[in-house]
Amino acid sequence: MKTVFLSNYYNHHQAPFSKAMDRLTNHNYYFIETEPIGGERQKLGWGIKDYPSFVRRMYLNGKEKDDCQRLINTADVVVAGSGPEYLLKHRLRDGKLTFRYSERIYKTGCKVYELPARRVLYYFRHGRYNNLYMLCASAYTAADYAKTGTFLNKTYKWGYFPEVRKYKDIDLLMNEKKKNSILWAGRLLEWKHPEACIQIAKQLKNDGYQFEMNLIGNGIIEARVQKMISNNNLKDSVHLLGAMPPYKVREHMETAGIYLFTSDFNEGWGAVLNESMNSGCAVVASHAIGAVPFLMKHDENGLIYQNGNMEDLYQKVKWLLDNPLKQKELGKQAYMTVVDHWNADMAAKRFTKLAQAILDGNKYPDLFSEGICSKAEMIENDWWKGK
């Protein structure tokens, strides 16, 4: 099954799935990169020095662009993320199997008066094609697209599948984690809410807790966060470590007991959730994050708090500090979730089965009861309300 993955650029989040697909298809897999990786991502260590043989960069020259277009047109199946719409024009017209790959489209809410125009636009872009399906890179994608009248009964759970590390002794990793250690990592942006960590640290200190909190990253509100740390006399407990490459972030995750993920609905997926769970962290995460309803089960492999509810967040962090054995148990179960299921190898195996079922004539396959490539139900923003 010749498979093409079309996206803006190849990076460490796409690499594990692509390598798994390359093996599974006996090197009949191609990743088409439509643009060079941006400067900001380069600074964060996202750049690729040595591209695998299956990566094609269509922006290099005219011949490469033509070759990539032929691959898109002739592949048995194409997965399309970010990229120019015209690249899929002939393929969709010819009714060839294509999967869109999308985070949610209404991160800041859906305005009712915009829906009629959106329905028309999305019908012509998606709805009129019978052999077009959706891989949901957010638990909220299916509900968002349903508002446009598209991809009904054609949405499947998906996401990002960063590198999975398998430790020889997960219990040893858990026992070597620093006591009362809390970590946050990401760009210091408004919608990621790093300031929530500082508020939690202030409450913990006022309540007499001894802890170490590290924040990794930089961004436009860095000065504000630093000022909050100083104003609340938290310099002895809270440290801004700046930006660092992904492998360094993982090293910090491996030593942290608790990981805080505080983004709001603007966080389409959030690959740091995969990575922190894989590192055995007890994660406390906002319900608004796209990956959370797919990867996490509350009080089984992490704790979920209601987005924006600072008291809810604080009580869950405090409870983990008060219950170190439960903290380790949740961290271990988080690790097992990623190693046993939510990983690139599983995604490649399930995706090929799903695609083959459709190619064999099953228009609405329902092959898996849960997890990757199972049917994605419609989850609304208030999913966590009252739980």
Image (spheres, rainbow, N blue to C red):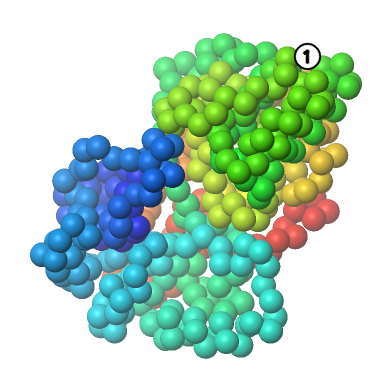
Q: Which residue sits furthest right?
A: 207
105 in relation to 89, above or below: above
Dot 1 surroundings within 10 Å: few (below 14), some, or many (20 or more)?
A: few
At 78% from the left and 14% from the top, the residue drawn is 210
At 70% from the left and 80% from the top, the residue drawn is 112
Query: Relative to 332, is 180 on the left or the right?
Result: right
x and y, in percent, of residue 40 in the image: 44, 44
Quarter holding residue 128? bottom left
x and y, in percent, of residue 240 in the image: 62, 26
Q: Is residue 2 visible from the viewing direction of this image?
A: no
Q: Is residue 55 visible from the viewing direction of this image?
A: yes
Quarter holding residue 216? top right
x and y, in percent, of residue 142 in the image: 56, 67
Q: Nearer the viewer, residue 75 or 108?
A: 108
Query: Relative to 295, is 320 on the left or the right?
Result: right
Query: Relative to 358, is 331 on the left or the right?
Result: right
160 in relation to 92, above or below: above
x and y, in percent, of residue 316 in the image: 78, 33
Secondary structure at badge 1 equals loop
Q: Nearer the viewer, residue 330 or 89?
A: 89
At 35% from the left and 45% from the top, the residue drawn is 11
At 34% from the left and 70% from the top, the residue drawn is 84
Residue bearing the label numbered 1? 210
Q: Nearer the viewer, residue 139 or 339?
A: 139
Quarter of the image for the N terminus: give it.
bottom left
Residue type highlighted by circle 1:
Gln
**Number of marks present in the image shown:** 1
